[in-house]
Image (tube, rainbow, N blue to C red):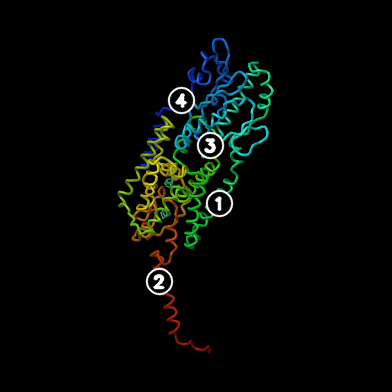
Amino acid sequence: MIKQIVVACLLLLVVGPLSADSVEFDLSQVREFFPVADRLEEVGEKPPVTRIYRGNVLLGYAFVTSYIVSIPAYSGEPIHTLVTIDTAGTITGVRILAHEEPILVVGITDDDLQQFIDQYVGKRIGETLKIGGRPRQGATVLDGISGATITVMVLNAGITRSLEEVGKSLTLSDELAPADKTGTAGATSGAHAPIWVQVWQERIFQIVVLALGLLVLLFILIMQDWLARHPRLLQRLRTGFLMYTVLFIGWYSLAQLSIVNVLTFLRSLFREFSWESFLIDPAMFILWSFVAVTIVLWGRGVYCGWLCPYGALQEFVFRLGRYLKVPSFEFPEIVHERLWAIKYIILLGLFGLSLHSMSLAETYAEVEPFKTAITLRFQREWGFVFYALLMLLASLFIRKFFCRYVCPLGAALTFPARFRIFDWLRRRKECGHPCQICRNECEVGSIRGTGEIIETECHYCLACQITYWNTQKCPPLIDKRRRQERHRRSEGGVAAKAPPSDPPT
Ligand code: SF4
Ligand code: SF4
């Protein structure tokens, strides 16, 4: 089935139309800020600026920030913002014309955004603007938007840097008043550090704690055989790590990977690829890099079993169910394996949609309850919260229900996992013939009745490895232990019964 899906994806890639982004504005939009304007005239292409007139009187200028400085935001696409300035270089209006920011699609309203960009009105070319934090001499502080820090930084950089470019060009062509020339020149003299550098500097605590967590996970993976022979330690480590995943990676860092990231990455390969759009969120970048490496080494289970906040949340819900003695349920193997197809079909559908429209794909990617449960911490409209809770509730009865049958990200991660290098999960010839202990314990039902581990489904929880080394539980080991004990007993008995040997002559 995987092969057919890959072929279908490639076909979609070949025939699917890529939406061409072209963002225009017209006189009616400009009149919002210059009500008496009656015509527009393009100044030139470098930078692309439009003059605003009433009759022959020049009123000001208008431009779209992304056509002057294209700074990719979360979605990998820039935010297209219309800015108008008067002939003295003062901003008279700012409007977002288009964006593809996933966080804005789901969490932040247009009013929040409008309130933020309205703060630019009255600011002048060359003025230093800073988002949040302590006041700094010579800088004007603007209020940010909680939960959309990076988007807001990109918006700010887009507006201020394009203003500088426009100011420089208009100064050179003597269109701005002399008083503005000095301040402009001052602002454009230095080179700007890429925006991601600023973000990484500001998030150093998050980066260090995440890196330490990933080192601990690497230690667990490398020492898995030793740890599996110390089950209590491994189980405690696992529970602690899953808590870290939900609390720190999920609810603190908001670093829940999503199918939207995969679609954005694939799309960027066929458009203008830019590292900057991936570096913009350090936690996501580090996590994706780690996942890319561990998928090739150990398979997709390292992410799904250890690093996915929503996956970890489901596991805790399942454990709560066992504590409350809620009966759990498993589909028969044949039904269980047929139901896997659902997640691949969802993946294929989202991929096809993303080729047509990324915004549409993002909307349908809500099939992942990640944004509701993790990014927005359940602070959302009741419909989304209901769905996220429903999926968690399902895990009370069927362990990791969403992961097994619905998750398109889990499905996407199975493709690179097919090339994994290490096969460190140990099996015995008795596994499945007739022993079924590990199969019954597997958290996602990835062990067949025949004893074979389906590597693309495995979440690398290591439960089967704990059993593998357990001399009180694993039947072949129990047999071996008993044989050894019998042997020792019989040796002891023989030794006890044996007559004293003859003294040497
Ligand atoms: S299958 Fe999906 S929800 Fe489950 S752990 Fe993997 S990515 Fe997370
Ligand atoms: S029990 Fe074994 S096969 Fe099942 S998910 Fe855990 S490591 Fe993978």
Kindly identify the amino acid type of the residue bearing the numbered disc 1. Answer: Leu
Mark 3 highlights which residue? 145
Residue 482 disc label: 2
Q: Which dot, 3 or 4, sits closer to the camera?
A: 3
Return the disc, 3 or 4, that comes first in the chain's sequence: 4
Badge 4 density bin: few <14, some 14–19, many ≥20, Cα 10 Å = few
Kind of residue indicated by mark 4: Ala
- In the rendered image, residue 225, in percent from the top left (x then y), is placed at 49, 59
> Does residue 286 appear anywhere in the picture?
yes
Q: Is residue 168 left or right of residue 353?
A: right
Q: Nearer the viewer, mark 1 or mark 3?
A: 3
Residue 150 lies, in percent from the top left, at 54, 37
Q: CA distance from mark 4 to mark 2?
A: 71 Å
**Precedes in sequence: disc 1 or disc 3:** 3
Disc 2 element: helix
Say whether residue 71 is left or right of residue 351.
right
Taking the spot 62% from the left edge, 25% from the top edge, the residue there is: 124
Kindly identify the residue that appears in the image at 50 percent across and 45 percent down: 291
Which residue in the structure is indicated by mark 1? 215
- Cβ atoms under marks 3 and 4 closer than 8 Å: no
Q: CA distance from mark 3 to mark 4?
A: 30 Å
- Local crowd size for mark 2, using a 10 Å CA cut-off: few (<14), some (14–19), many (≥20): few
Q: Secondary structure at mark 1?
A: helix
- Of mark 2 and mark 3, the one earlier in the sequence is 3
- According to the picture, the residue beneath numbered tag 4 turns out to be 20
Decide: is 197 above or below 444. above
| Tag 4–tag 2 contact (CB < 8 Å) | no
Q: Residues within 10 Å of mark 1 (few under 14, many from 20)?
A: few
Q: Residue at x 48, y 44 (%)?
A: 256
Give the mark, 4 or 2, whose residue is nearer the N terminus: 4
Q: Compute the Cα span from label 1 to label 3.
A: 33 Å
